[in-house]
Amino acid sequence: MKPSILKKTVLNLFHKGHSKNLSELIGRVHPVDMALVFPGIRDKERKVFFDQIIDNPNAAKILSEMTDKKLIIKILNGLDHKRIGEIFHHMEPDDAADILGYLPVMDAEAILRLMQREDSIEINKLLRYEPDTAGGMMTPSLVSFHADTDVDDAIKKLKKNRIIDHIIYVYVVDKDSRLLGYLPLNDLLLFPGSTKMGKVINENTFYVKTHIPINEVLRIVNKYHLLELPVVSKGKQLVGVITSDDVMDIMKHENSQKLLKDSGVSYIDDPINASIWEYFKTRSWWLFFCFFAGIATALATQEITEIPINTMSYITMIPLVIMMSVVSSIQTSAATSRNIFLGKLDGDSKIKVLYKEMKLSIIMGIIFGVMSGGFNFGFNQNPKLSCVVALSVFALFPVSTLIGFIMPVLMTRIKRRPSTSFVPFTATVSSLVNVCLYLLISTNLMAIDIIARI
């Protein structure tokens, strides 16, 4: 089911009060898809909606699949600590630890006290590690046997506990829980039942220590094409494992964050409900840098030429227009590409995000338009030229934003990666359109012939 159709179906059942049908739908839909529905629900309705699904077995999985920290906090703030502890009981310990890390320390401690002792011990162990290390990334859910365990006994234990579904490797440790090696689960069937586990393991085991940074973990996993990576303490005791799911989540996050950083913009977790001020903070610093770089270029150009000052002021604003239009369009395009990649833009959400982007562009246009016009007036005392420059700079922001938003959406429609559009194509189109717009505005308002004057 498409995200937009799923969201409409869920909200329709919710508003009509069909709790039973809603619960059945949530039980059938994958938690990842359900997690994408929550950002599209209004804050006032979200608490009531989560209250209706909280007893569903998938509620914990849905919560663990959400990527927006602020949204998770909003949901949990509406629940008592005991109820939160019950939800965490159905989560993987590493997911529960991550979410507890978002909460105030006093709330996290209160929740841990109310949880089952076994769950709280596992989560407390994970909370000791920094989130950007192997220890903070790992899950303690693994299968290990002592070296003197018979193969038959290992198989019986696996069958008894019904923990075969998601296991790739079983690990072998000594009496002090130090890692000795591993064995693929399927290989257990190849050896006689009386064989000791320590005799059949692969001793050439890649592992990392708990303090190793995430970047180093990703390098090792990618270099050696590992499906899992065990994590050990300083004494080489086996304490957890980093799964392929963990690696994919981190790589997705790291790659998309790199995309944004290279584009001069920070990511907004909840683009639909975020305020304009949050949007402004993620974009403004690079735009201010480009503005002052453009002004410096204009001043330097005027110093080394002998063209009349009014004409020169007109011409030297073109690099400023190009730079700011390119940066503005790339920022919008990069943020839109990541939202599409994470499944946060579909149906109505596209309109809502575009509305906020355009609202931000008008604010940016006013700020930089006034600054550009003020600079020109202070430099050449020509109010007409200053108004032209101010109006042109104001106009470039909505135009650049619209181009930056449409390009990745269009690429998605034609089955291309949205990120392929934002640098070469978006930047070229945006700069071309905005220079033409600048020339059109100035020619009509000032009625000057640039070629004749030059």
Image (spheres, helix red, strand yellow):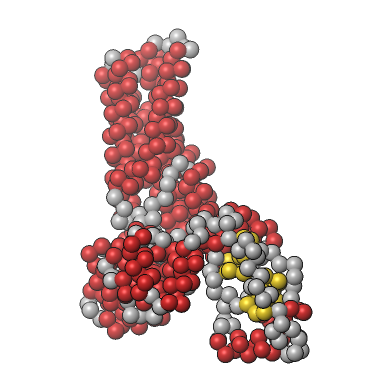
Quadrant in the rendering for residue 288? top left
Residue at the limit of the structure toward the top, as seen here? 306
Q: Residue at x 32, y 37 (%)?
A: 364
Quadrant in the rendering for residue 308? top left
Q: How many marks?
A: 0
On the image, the x and y values in percent for residue 347 come to 35, 62
On the image, the x and y values in percent for residue 152 come to 69, 90
Q: Is residue 358 above or below residue 171?
A: above
Query: Image check: 212 left or right of 106?
Result: right
Q: Quadrant of the N terminus?
A: bottom left
Closer to the camera, 181 or 9? 181
Q: Is residue 402 above or below residue 287?
A: below
Question: From this viewpoint, is residue 341 visible?
Answer: yes
Q: Residue at x 44, y 63 (%)?
A: 98
Q: Quadrant of the C terminus?
A: top left
Quadrant in the rendering for residue 343? bottom left
Query: Image check: 146 left or right of 115?
Result: right
On the image, the x and y values in percent for residue 33 come to 42, 70
Question: From this viewpoint, is residue 31 visible?
Answer: no
Q: Residue at x 33, y 47 (%)?
A: 278
On the image, the x and y values in percent for residue 264 come to 45, 41
Q: Is residue 205 above or below residue 214?
A: below
Closer to the camera, 62 or 178? 178
Q: Residue at x 71, y 82 (%)?
A: 148
